Image (tube, helix red, strand yellow):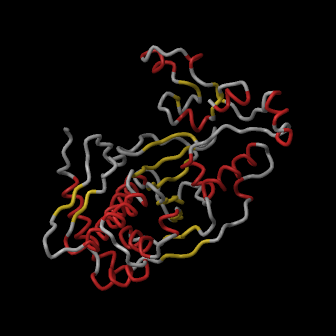
Amino acid sequence: LLSLKFCGKAETSLSMASGTGLYDLHKLEWDTELLKYLKLRPAALSTIGIEQQLLKKWQRRWPQLAEALWHPSIADGAANNVGSEAVDGSTAALMVGTSAALRVILNRPPSKIPKGLFCYRLDADRLVLGGALSDGGGFYDWLRRNLEIRTSDAALGKELRSRGPGARGLVLMPFFAGERSTGYNEFAAGSIHGLTIAHDSIDILQAAMESVAYRLAEILDQIESVTPVKRIIASGGALSASKVWPQIIADVLGRDLELFRESEASMRGAVLLALRTTGKIELSDTAAPRFSKIKFDPGTHAAYRPAFERHRAHYQNIDTKP
């Protein structure tokens, strides 16, 4: 809509087009068979563009932008991968902001997309494979606010270390905003199992943080059925604001994390992709951003296994009907 309003053409990027499900990932064109089934004319859809300029009236209004080239929007997940330097199939980008996601970039379409994952184009050469969760940092903030948990992150970390993994037996299903990966169950809802009078608000918060890590672990398992992941780069405001949560995720996954220390990985990725599109850089030429290492603890990882299995067992019993 903005493209039509400001530049005169309703253009979109290959990345955003492929995310609609109406775009053929192999032929790089709108899926004619699907459009025919849906009784949609290709002319009713956006054209795929690379760059445009403002219409004359907007050039007069904003003379500073008169010569600027406007690139169509790309998927924020794809931009996050590029911005955090996770641009090869062996490096995954793990993001926990308001929601959460785990993705890799591939050079060719997978022979089969694993159940519960998405796959769309970054550009004509590469694809994004991964999964996303509705509940992430937004859910964490909601719990802290409604449970009136005012403990600092440092104090929370000390308390959780004294309690150990597993939230004292609590099992939480983190679908308070619905489920995306890996089940895409439209009727899933959040739930807490095993709650007794012996538990407290910290147990619930810990169970929530661990449950997001369990769901990310399930996504990682699905991704690795396509390509082995050797490196995980983590980013997002929820992880930057906490030393506790990145460690929980690393210990659940049994993987070291490289925490991206630059602000706005997705914005950085959008800029890098625009520079690549105009031929100014290759993504491999970019300066390495700052990372800090989060090392997983093998003993804690082993201690998480029974809790992870409890989570999986309860997940299998989620209602699939309203």
In the image, taking residue 104 as reference, residue 67 lies left or right, namely right
| Residue 269: % across, % down | 65, 53
Quadrant of the image occupied by residue 16: top right
* x and y percentages locating residue 138 in the rendered image: 42, 58
The reply, left or right, for residue 304 in relation to residue 68 is: left
Tally the marks.
0
Q: Report the side of 100 relative to 275 (left or right).
A: left
* Quarter assignment of residue 211: bottom left
Q: Position of residue 162 (x, y in %)?
A: 30, 86
Q: Nearer the viewer, residue 209 or 214?
A: 209
Quadrant assignment for the C terminus: top left
Lateral position of residue 154 relative to residue 105, left or right: left
Residue at (48% x, 42% y) in the render: 119
Q: Residue at x 60, y 54 (%)?
A: 266
Write down the quadrant of residue 121 in the picture: top right
Image quarter where the N terminus lies is: top right
The residue closer to the viewer here, 134 or 151, is 151
Q: Position of residue 146 (x, y in %)?
A: 32, 63
